[in-house]
Amino acid sequence: MSDTARLVTSSGLLLAVAVGALLVRLFPGTNPLDKWGFDLVASSSAAPWRVIAALGSVPIVLAASLLGAVLARRDRRRAVACLLGPALAGLLTEIILKPLSGRELGGSLCFPSGHVTGAGALVALGLLGTPRRWRAVGLGIAVAVLVAVMWAVVALGWHYPTDALAGAAVGAGSVLFVDAGITALRRPWRRVSGSSSPRPGRRWRHRSLPAHRRPPSERGLHRPRRHLTSVVRRS
């Protein structure tokens, strides 16, 4: 996925969740999508579901974030995105989106789901932080964890199904947004810093410059020197 595609996709996901939070505030209660989700997922308070839901908790996501930064240490942009992306996702969920939606379940704000936000961030970390040869495996594991956490929080009665969907969008979208945003900010700086000197090991082309501004090797100034040398030798 290109940097532009990541920026557009992540921005769309975050904007969709913000619009969803406003709709939930205007039309509270169970919507048709929630009803379908509750019919699909059987309610249960079994201990295994709690263990699965904990995979999206802060300690797990923090450990995965640090691991992703270590695996992507050769690419500073990716390493920074692995560290800052999950933090941004948590802040958006707890400080902005939950108060904006105002939806409550069991006496606490629930849209979007914080546990699923963490699991969604794991998916983006699996995409960005895993080495290329292991990326398919890492991404597959992260997606499986995301689906399991979404199912668990609904089965436990902690969240509506739309809370889980919104959490997945915020988690993945935030990490991808930070990654694409860092790239977009670095490009203008590269143009400015790289405009005054060529890259080592490459020939600097000046075809668009006037002749008097080109290097001597490209405007033929070395030829008179060789001519003068030959004249001296003849004399």
Image (spheres, grey):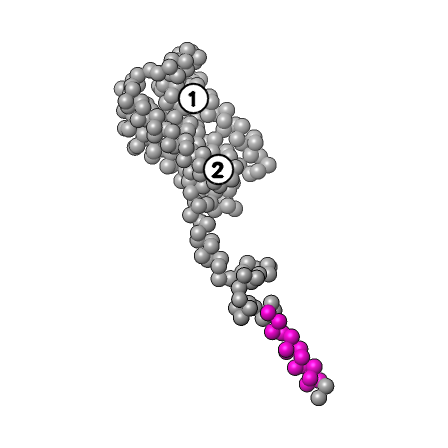
User: Which corner quadrant of the image does residue 180 belong to?
Assistant: top left
Q: Amino acid at mark 2?
A: Ala
Q: Residue at x 70, y 81 (%)?
A: 230
Mark 2 sits on what residue?
A: 5
Q: In the image, is residue 227 part of the stretch drawn in magenta?
A: yes
Query: Residue 53 is drawn in which quadrant?
Result: top left
Q: Report, in whole angstroms, how far the alpha carbon at label 2 lies from the one at label 1.
A: 26 Å
Q: Residue furthest bottom?
A: 235
Mark 1 Cα shell of 10 Å, populated few (<14), some (14-19), many (≥20): many
Q: Find numbered disc 2 in the image and state the secondary structure of the residue it sits on.
A: helix
Closer to the chain start, of discs 2 and 1, is 2
Tell me residue 181's x, y (percent): 42, 43
Against 207, residue 44 (above or below) is above
Residue drawn at x 38%, y 32% is 14
Residue 63: within the magenta? no
What residue span does the magenta drawing correspond to?
219-233
Residue 33's disc is none
In which quarter of the view is residue 120 placed?
A: top left
**As drawn, is 232 to the left or to the right of 40?**
right
CA neighbours of label 2 inside 10 A, class few (<14), some (14 to 19), many (20+): few
Looking at the image, is mark 2 or mark 1 nearer the viewer? 2
| Vertical position of residue 23 compared to residue 187: above or below | above
75 or 193: which is nearer to us?
A: 193
Query: Please, what is the dominant secondary structure of the magenta stretch?
Result: helix
Which residue is drawn at the image coordinates 34% and 33% (left, top)?
92
Q: In the image, what residue type sits under mark 1?
A: Met
- Give me the disc on residue 150: 1
Q: Please tell me how many numbered marks the rendered image carries.
A: 2
